[in-house]
Amino acid sequence: MHHGIQPSVSVPPQAAPYAPDIEPAAEHVRHARHALVDSEPGLPAPVLAAAAGTRRAVLVPVLTALAIGTVFVAVYLAAFHAPSARHQPVGIAASDKVAARTELALNNAAPDGYTFHRYPDAAAARQAIAHDQVPAALVADDRGTRLLVAGAEGPSTVSSLATAVTTAVGKPVPVKDVLPLAAGDARGLSVFYAAFGVVLAGFLFAVSSYQIAPRLRLAVRVASMLVFAAASGLMVALIAHTGMSALPAPFGVVTLVVGLLAWAAAAAAGVLLRVFGPLGMPVASVVLLILGNATSGGILPTTFLPAWLSPLATVLPPAAAVRGLRGAAYFHDAHLTGAVATLAAWGLGCLALQYLLDRVAARRQDLAAAR
């Protein structure tokens, strides 16, 4: 046994300890130039591998959000920054002389702003207002001159018509509200908020459904969509009708119309995602959330929309739902049948189109496999 100083031995640096939780693929992805930094522990390697490059990751969200925001600002400002009537119906129950003078004055103030409906007496004018044929009617008889209005059309509509008629007549005209808003709907905007919320929910439903299960069978997707639509209709009816008395239409009607709107919005957003792929989300945002809600008539009547926007009010789901709900709440079910038909057509049409797209895709796959 030797005593003394032991020779120094150089110890090689230890290798990095083996971590069984870190897969080689994940390590490779982490150092790849196009991958995102794994700042979120446990992010799956396939997710990092599919990540966009830095330039695309920065530019695409900016451009997409900027485009949607620009469209939103442009559409809503164009529609509501200085609204003016276009072919707004106005009733007149007065002598030919008074009626002609009033019509001439209104036409001079706003060419193409109004269309006139003559009625023999105040009772006929009231009947027309009650069935949403005109929002207001000027009556001049032995009881004096007065303006009958439907407060259910909303304060903005009543105010603009009262101002226009007063100016045309040349003296103050008493205003009588023959169809006021419900106590729980003081500003007449409840139907707009309900429709906007349901359309937004339908859009989010479609997006989340396709993100979670992009290859889900259509039958299962439809079943999920119908559950969502039924729950939406019931939820809005319980809150807006029963809880707040903001929608005075019958409970069942509110449930039906809102449910059909949720179904139509989800089906439309789904088919846009199916057709446009990654661009489907911004396209659906513009069509449903921006154009659909701006032209719904929930804020101002569609007769106050610019000429390039007003045609959309006759076909898009939010406008149909607003017409149906407002008609059922205040105007003896005016427009209800048309609204239900429009919403059902949107739901069925979008599902039929998606079925055809799925069939075409399946046939292409079969042909490719046969080769």
Image: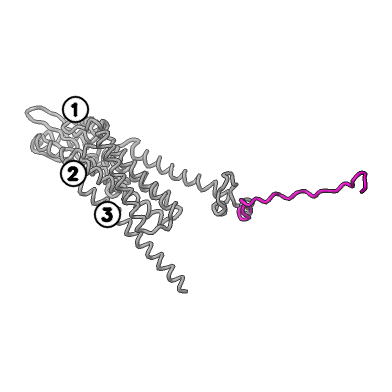
Residue at the farthest front position: 1
Q: Which segment is the magenta one?
A: 1-27
Q: Residues within 10 Å of mark 1 (few under 14, many from 20)?
A: few
In percent of width and height, residue 322 lies at: 26, 42
Q: CA distance from mark 1 to mark 3?
A: 48 Å
Q: Quick check: 141 left or right of 235?
A: left
Q: CA distance from mark 1 to mark 2?
A: 34 Å
Residue at figure coordinates x 35%, y 35% from the top left: 81
Residue type of the residue flagged with mark 1: Gly
In percent of width and height, residue 245 lies at: 24, 34
Residue picked out by circle 1: 170
Residue type of the residue flagged with mark 2: Ala
Of residue 307 and residue 302, the one placed in the foreground of this image is 302
Tag shown at residue 345: 3
Residue at figure coordinates x 38%, y 62% from the top left: 358
Q: Quadrant of residue 167?
A: top left
